[in-house]
Amino acid sequence: MMFIRLWLFFAGVLATLFLGWAALVGVPGMQLASVAPQQGLRPYTYEQMHGRQIYIREGCAYCHSQQTRAEGFGSDQQRRWGRASVPGDYVYDRPHLLGTSRTGPDLWNIGARQPSRSWHLTHLYNPRSVVRESVMPPFPWLFVEKTEAGPEDVMLDVPPAFRPRAGVSIVATREALDLVEYLLGLDHTYPVAPGAGKP
Amino acid sequence: MQPPAEEQAPDRLASRQELDRAAALPVLLYFGSGIAWLLAGTLLGVAASLKFDLPDWLGTIAQLTYGRIRPAHLNVMAYGWASLAGAGCLVWLTSRLCRVPIRRPEWLIASVLLWNLGVAYGALSILLGYSQSVEWLEYPLPAAGIIAAAFLLFASSILATFRARKVEHLYVSLWYIMASVVWFPPLYVVANLPIYTGVVHGAVNWWYGHNALAVWFTPVGLTLAYYFIPKVIGRPIYSYYLSLIGFWAFALFYNWNGIHHLVGGPVPTWLQTISIIASVLMVIPVMAVAVNHHMTTIGNFRMLRTSPTLRFTVFGAMSYTAVSFQGSMEALRTMQEVVHFTHYTVGHAHLGVYAFLTMILFGAMYYITPRVAQWNWTRPGWIKAHFWLSAGGVLLYVAAMVVGGFLQGLAMNDAAKPFVEVVDLTRPYLTARTVSGILMGAGHLVFALLFVEVVLRRGPRRLAPPWEAGGAG
């Protein structure tokens, strides 16, 4: 080539890619392979896993992070969003949903912060029915309208202004209920096991 | 060192026309489908932005909820528009720089078809709810596999052309092209493997997310700037040795940048630190490239008025310097504490992928299209309008997101401010973004119409090279 042999050029180019992989993926992968689940962390239930799939499908991760920062870095601690998260909190997460945006608040401990199922359901049906200034999208397709709700149905307490028409009940589907199960399960407020903090 | 000069000797001119004709069909297919994705991606982007202004607009259609059209926008723009347009430019440029007709054109045509299939499959999957929800890697595995196959076909045509080259000296643009066609396939395949869990998956995500820029999108932009700035101005690149330093420093440092997307997160601190250091070290290749590009341009600014290619390319090269320095600063912990998780990052991304890469792609396409189509651009006034709509649009975009995002970050770090106040504060900036998106979209529409006119041969026939015919190259 212009300055070295051609094979050396291609070898060098591939080596730079490999070095970057080794540093950012290979070594951390080995270091974190032995991370045990935090004591207090429970595997997702079937309903929560299903709810997590809805969370993924609707792209919640584009506005909500699932990682809490330590004291002295941002206001997560003052806002009581929960202690700084550690790798052992995430061992059941696949795909990861760490997120890079807080257009809405962090959700890593939303289950502890807002434990009301009916609040979450109404909020998902139309966020502005409970938080006037919200810019979050509504998710009406997770609900059905019924004129006569059955005994098993979970009905929503939606303010009249947000109902499609008077006299109908808004009933949560399995998808809405499982999504809320997942959100309520996002509770990582248990203490970090000694020595199991961030490497 | 100089790209092969546009000598006026008739045999050289004839041979260049021969090269352009051989590349015509694949290049126009890459360009045409790239532009179609640009229009689709613009619609998705403007709609996503508008949803902040009107959160209940289209609020009952699941397929068009924000969390689906936003990733669809990113993927359509990255893998549809920028990748297809970029691949078309590289096909043409490789043939020109190696002085041989492009090899395996039928593989390129297969590549275009597969690529479009993959992008469409992936985008529809996201809208229909089958996203992987991993940024830059949302496409389901079959779609990613199709795109990987399309890229391999493209890469093998490029490498075959390179092997058949009839030149001794390899111009700097060729280094970037050869590097990116061997870098991208392993990166894309390894990142898509469904084997990662927890925070390691986060690390893989951002190793990929930043490296997609490092090994594909940025080399495409740089290789075109390295070619077209000296080419149009007609003087050699400022310093050969700076291009060498720039290239190898770029290859070494850029690969280590990714974890600056997880600063303050649950990944090991040492890992965040090396990515921050590498981000700052990027100043070295960026300085080298900046000095090379800008010193070549300096003293020739009046040519920006006459050559649309140069105007777009120089705007892009300046944006590259700006976005790179911004990125190096942004990676520092002090800055990340404020701007991580805010719209600031989105502003930075558009300064890179739009103000730098997309503008350079426009510039290159203004040069290449009439040469391969053998037909000249019509309406120079429209080309001007396209430039100002795109340039003005993206400057407004970046200004709104950078200022709005920074204020958002400061407010978020003030625990006394309720979260809804932080949301409220960003509204005017998000509205400005919607306006900027409409401006850029108008520019894209103008560009698409111009392209269609050339392909349909509506304008003047290209009989003579541009220095005689006064063409718009």
Image: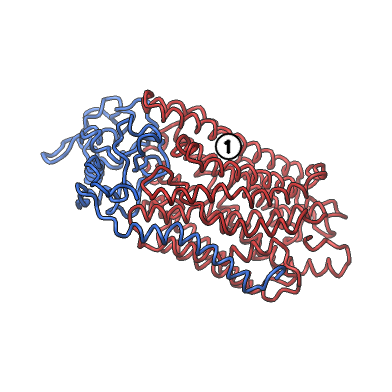
Chain colours: A blue, B red
Q: Position of residue B261 (x, y in %)?
A: 46, 46
At label 1, counting other C-alpha atoms closer than 10 Å, the crowd grade (few under 14, some 14-19, many 20 or more) is many
Query: Residue at the bottom extreme?
Result: B164
Foreground of the two, B119 or B262: B262
Name the chain letter of the residue that bears numbered label 1: B
Query: Residue at the left extreme?
Result: A151
Left-right relation of A135 to B304: left
Rendered position, B17 above or below B355: below
Query: Residue at the top extreme?
Result: B416
Q: Position of residue B81 (x, y in %)?
A: 57, 53
The residue identified by callout 1 is: B398
Residue type at tag 1: Val
Q: Position of residue B25 (x, y in %)?
A: 66, 65
Q: Residue at x 25, y 51 (%)?
A: A50
Q: Residue at x 37, y 31 (%)?
A: A75
Quadrant into which the N terminus of chain B falls: bottom right
Left-right relation of A169 to B220: left
Q: Residue at x 32, y 40 (%)?
A: A84
Residue B200 visible in the displayed image: yes
Rendered position, A116 above or below B98: above
Q: Quadrant of residue A154?
A: top left
Q: Position of residue B227 (x, y in %)?
A: 73, 57
Left-right relation of B15 to A142: right
Left-right relation of B119 to B230: left
Foreground of the two, B119 or A149: B119
Looking at the rendered structure, the secondary structure element under dot 1 is: helix
Residue A173 visible in the displayed image: no
Rendered position, A168 above or below A192: above
